[in-house]
Image: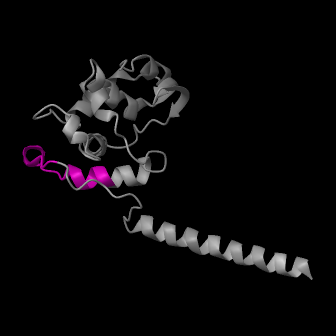
Amino acid sequence: MRHIYANRAAYLLAALLVVATALFAWLRSEGGTLVALDDDAPEVTEFDEVNGWAWRETGEQVFVADCQGCHVRLTHTPELFTAEGGRSYLIELVLFGFDGEMVIDGSARQVDHPAFAGHDDEQLAAVLNHVLVSWNNADELPEDPDLYLPDYIDEARDRELGPEEVAERRPSL
């Protein structure tokens, strides 16, 4: 008799997982997020006006769709951005990926970060800017930071680096 209850419990659990998966898929398709994003990010209206595109919305959408699965918060990005060679490194990281050892919170880890060169220049510039100003990261940036423009991404595409080369170029913090 116990096996009948065990089978029913397993079927119920499976049904709940299917419903939860469907709900999560629907939430993601509607642009929903399970992570609260920082509303205190500074306005960067000059950037929007000069380039004629709303990078904030695009950046958040790309982050939710392609980055949030692995990264909940990226609070070390301003440190990389302001390090010598850091601006270029961040572009190379999203364009060409990363394959090597990285020290994260004091621990050395083997990291294999995918390349996102298939995204257009506006999407990559937008997601980099999104990460730079979210989660109170903007407080760690210099005053009036030179945020990423799609042209910066376009120029970097010519470098054609491998993920191992990107790992070697990571600034030491």
Instruction: Provide residue 12's location: percent of width, then percent of height.
Output: 71, 78
Colouring method of the image: one colour
Of 26 and 37, the residue lying toward us: 37
- Which residue is at the far front? 106
Residue at point 40% right, 41% down?
Answer: 118
Q: Quadrant of the C terminus?
A: top left
Residue 95 falls within the magenta-colored stretch: no
Instruction: Provide residue 114's location: percent of width, then percent of height.
Output: 48, 37
Q: Is residue 63 above or below residue 137?
A: below
Residue at point 83% right, 75% down?
Answer: 6
Residue 57 falls within the magenta-colored stretch: yes
Q: Is residue 2 above or below residue 65?
A: below
Res 170 → quadrant: top left
Instruction: Provide residue 108's location: percent of width, then percent of height.
Output: 53, 24
First to last magenta residue range = 42-60
Q: Is residue 159 above or below residue 133?
A: above
Res 71 → quadrant: top left
- Residue 114 left/right relative to 50: right
Residue 148 visible in the displayed image: no
- Residue 113 left/right relative to 124: right
Q: Quadrant of the N terminus?
A: bottom right
Of 115 and 60, the residue lying toward us: 60
Residue 117 visible in the displayed image: yes
Residue at point 36% right, 49% down?
Answer: 63
- Residue 163 left/right relative to 80: right
Of 141 and 145, the residue lying toward us: 141
- Residue 128 left/right relative to 73: left
Numbered label tally: 0
Instruction: Provide residue 33's location: percent of width, then percent of height.
Output: 39, 61
**Most common SS among magenta residues:** helix
